[in-house]
Image: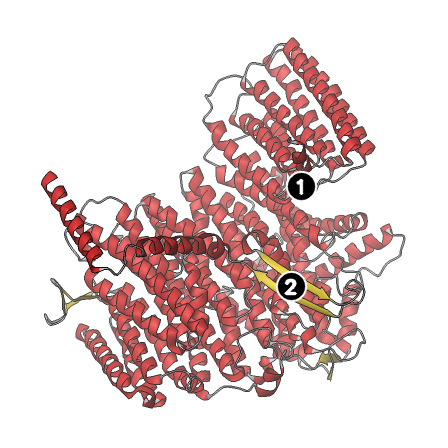
Amino acid sequence: MSSIDSISCLTIALSFWLIQALVSIFAGRKCSNKLSSAFFLFPSLLLCLSAISGWNKDLLVSAPRFFQFGQEVLTMHLDKLSAVYLLLLGLVSTALSFFSPVYMKHLSDRVNSGHFWSALALFMIAMTMLLLSANAVAFLVFWELMSLSSLALVASEHKQRRVQQAGIIYLGATRIATAFLMAGFLAMHAFSHSWVFSDWGQSAFPIWPSFLILIGLCIKAGIWPFHIWLPYAHPAAPSPVSALMSGVMIKIALYAVIRILVSQNLASELLGHVALALGLVSSLWGVLFALVQQDLKKLLAYSSVENLGLILMAIGLAIVAKAQGLPEISLLALSAAILHSFNHGIFKSLLFLSAGAVDCTVHSRDMQQLGGLARKMPLTMAAFLTGAFAISALPPLGGFIGKWMLYQGLLRTAWESSSLAERALGLTSVGTLALVGALALASFAKAFGISFLGNARSKAVAEHASETANGMIFAQIFLSLCALVSGLFAAPAAMQAASVASRALQFNTRTPALAVISLLDQTLYALLLFALIYGVYLAASKRKTYITWECGFGSLSPRCQSSPISFAQPMARIFSLILRFKLLVEITGKDRRNFPEHIKVEPQMVSLLESRVYLPTISWIQNLSRAFAKLQAGSIHLYLLYVCATLVILVLVGTRL
Amino acid sequence: MNLDLIELVSIAAALSAILMAGSTHLSMNIALYSLQTFLLSLATYSLAGLRAESHFIWVALAIVVLKALGIPLFLHWIMVKIGVNSDPGTTLAPPLAMHCCVLLMGLSYFLAQSLPSSSLEGHSWANATAAISLLLSGLILMLTRRIALSQIIGFLVIENGIYLFALTQTSGMPLVVEMGVLLDVLVGVMISGLLVFRIQRSFEHIDVTQLTELRD
Amino acid sequence: MKELDPNEIYRWLIFLPSLLILPALVLGLLRKTKARLQNRIGAPLFQLLFDLKKLSGKGETLSDAISWIFRSTAALNLSMLLLLSLVCPWLVFKPALGTSDLFYVMYVFAAIRFFTLLAALDSASPFAAFGASREATLSILVEPALMLSFAALAVNAKSSELSRVFEFAANSGVEASAIWAFAGMGILLSSLVELSRMPIDDPTTHLELTMVHEAMILEASGRTLALLEYGQALRMTILFGLVTQCFMHVFPAVIALSLGLKVLLSFLGILFIAISLGIFEVLSVKLRWRRNPDFIAYALTMGLLASLIAVGKGLLS
């Protein structure tokens, strides 16, 4: 295929979405979900196609002068790095176009479908263009479009108070992120006199603008301590939107870290260390909070914080290793970041879609109400199991390889680096990552085991649960297969990621050989053994069915099963210093001690950051603004006085200078 | 790198201090202290041969008798008398205190590197690491424990650290000074042991975290 | 297809029977030691094999709440364990199969745990769920210790391939010995926790509320139970084998021995660990649940010490 193909594919896809955005906003509630999704599917497939055909190419295209932002022409740059993320975006949006119609039907009385599809199309345009923009002005414009369109999507059910609150928090986070980013970009422009990213690396500059950019991007990516918008926004947003936001959008923020900071050589060693530390803390923090959640989507949101932390850690390691002259480790770590971004995008979207499918059929995401879905929704269960297995980084699925490469990078630092502190840091990070891995495994064993296995904990689930519609199933199976393929063919995928990374790191030499383990043969052996043991030994035994052992008390109520809180309680107790996790027990009755009549147990969890940092800051700002508000008294004469005073001061200052 | 006997012994002593920070049993801690002191006397004895200083032999003997046997027995007697055998620790739980000590041992590695080098027998980074690590572990032990008896043990570990440092990093102290220090330690322990006994009698506990009510 | 080396055939010929006999012998010796110290005669040494035979002949009683996960777990876990037994260098002469990467091995162990937890939650039994919750708790405590111990060894050998790490290369002095010793202790203590053995959990009590592993497999019966029991014994043998290898590396004299003696030593070492564990289990008591972190902390301390030395190795002299 010639180079024109991928660009024209992209142009067609973008114009399709533009048309869709315009048409569906006028259609409003009359907008047909099926038609919209068919219209949405075509550009999604084109996106995948353009990513694949644009692979191995380096295309720099300037749009016609018509698309001009101030003095800057809209320039698009398609290389391998953006192609990886375009492919991810295309795959997820393909799955979404199958999933959304059924889901939207379930929400039809609460959500205006025209607005939804319009915002979704704009969101897609923004993300695609963000991946392609080669200068800062275009980047900021599409960054804003992405923030605002995703805000519109998060607030789809804007009549509910919970959603309003989530929307406000998300809006606040995006504003602050943009402010930091803009400040950083302006500073870079002041130093380099150019808006084009590739010019930035040429001139000398102080390091603080790169920190401003990093903070702005980290807020969007949900890195600790800026992650608090994630657990609000995801439960409020419709599932397809969560899938897109968690799967792709937050990764685009880290893509920008690679694109702007790493590949333009803006990142100093200090920045690398900061990124490494932030990543380590957010991975631990995120997974700890994921462990104690009851809401399925909140759990997934916190797990995103964890995984984004891992990716940022890998980027940080890449920066540090490059600065210290360890190119192989740097390459390994950046490939890990890219590969894990892609894989996490796939299986996190899958998990959000499965959670959405559960929500759709039983109208609850509270794990306390779920249970026993395995027999009622076998395909959804298989999809969620695939996702949970992959996100726990278990071989052979997609999550393993990225984590493996990160582990390798850290471990090799421990003997290749010449500095003792660096070595110690590498080995300590390996230990912490092991803890994070075990915690992630526990939280996803809990998420899957409590919601899908055992018996139904509520009547609604026991009676109404049944397999969801075909579109939803297809979307989940599609993403499961993607996760499986990317896991089984991890070695070639890692090779490709390494070639992307070596370009991003500007290694001029040929890609150093990257020894990646191949899991294909061992998986095959294990499956053969499994088939042998199951088929020959286990399948032949005589079986009879009976109730679960209950010490002879008669049948147990399904509420006797472990609850999501009770499962996590021993672990939460160990980390009570961070989690502030408590069980509030209230016993009432005449003789409380011996004959309690009612026992009420309620888990309480205080978010340390919110209660100690963010709320005090917000109330401080509110008080400050209230003080400023007193200036605005409403009297015309007072305002004229202000104008006069300002004028006098300015004149005085002007003459002094 | 090959460690000689003195280095092995002093590192083993430092390790025993780390284990002490993790143990909640007072009798275990007293036994470990005794072992640690015995190891230090072994180091002193072998240095006597290497540096050809005969008075080190007498110092080693005095350490064994007074510090490795006398003080532990006395502390054990106090412990039985007041009937307390476990120390639950304060906010920093004993296991975490132990991990802190390991990390501090890593820090001692750094500190020991920055010391000026010398050709003196026994003057090596391993011994300096062990000595600083002993000192810091003793501090951690004193910081994280609740029972007054543990504070005494922590103090003794610090004293061991200082002794090891003086022994290996300098050319050693004269016999009279050594004996004086030993006597000081012995008397200090005696007095504080009796004080613990008195505290137990008047307050019915020896929990140092609750002694804050005495500040007026 | 390359030609088969006769040596390779001998290896398989010794290895395959030892896969069946060694787990039975380890468990049998452990139980026998405990019984003799408690003045009981105790079960025969190969009781596990008799149990497996008996369980194979029995039918299965299954809970009405289970899905396909429950029974597949037993088969899947055993197949992963067999794979691990081929991959991990837990015996000196073992035939090698594919990669034995440290992180891969750790995550296959994690996958086994994942399925065990799911199977426990699958039966809708509150006891099993208790066990699962405890197992998850223990695993998060023990994972850093195990990982750090292995990572220290990997740094020592400058390779993350376990088969390279456990190669009998020339020992580079006290430092390497210390790393091996600390890592060996770390792995031993961690494996006691992983296997839910004595100070953490008493597998011989009959109180479902307190147990960890036995509570999780409460609903299994017949052939499923047989697979789980054998799997647990195999896991124990592999972990003890790794510990033995660690301790063999501590002594430079062992490294110079001939292959035959090394093979013998590694077998004897595993059995020795089983016997000493039996003695330890008689002498010790099960810790209260809340005291378990205190015990596991020692495993982490060993791991930390091993990595401390490994990090400094080569930089200081």
Q: Is residue A598 left or right of residue A163?
A: right
By what rule are the colours in the image chosen? secondary structure
Subunit of label 2: C
**Residue C298 sits in which quadrant?**
top right
Q: Residues within 10 Å of mark 1 (few under 14, many from 20)?
A: many
Q: Do the residues labelled 2 and 1 touch (CB within 8 Å)?
A: no
Residue C20 image position (x, y, % from top left): 70, 64
The label nearer to you, 2 versus 1, is: 1
The foreground one among A573 and B98 is A573
Q: Is residue A578 left or right of residue B31?
A: left
Q: Residues within 10 Å of mark 2 (few under 14, many from 20)?
A: many
Residue under label 1 = B89
Q: Is mark 2 on a helix, strand or loop?
A: helix
Residue A113 image position (x, y, % from top left): 35, 84
Residue C299 image position (x, y, % from top left): 63, 47
Name the residue type under label 2. Ser
- How many marks are shown on the rendered structure? 2
Q: Residue at x 55, y 82 (%)?
A: A378
* Quadrant in the picture for the C terminus of chain A: top left
Q: What element carries label 1?
A: loop
**Residue A245 sits in which quadrant?**
bottom left
Q: Which residue is drawn at 42% across and 54% down?
A: A279
Residue C245 image position (x, y, % from top left): 62, 48
Residue under label 2 = C133
Q: Is residue A536 above or below residue A328?
A: below
**Residue A26 sits in which quadrant?**
bottom left
Q: Residue at x 43, y 65 (%)?
A: A230
Name the residue type under label 1. Gly
Q: In this view, does A260 lie above or below A423?
A: below
Tag shown at residue B11: none
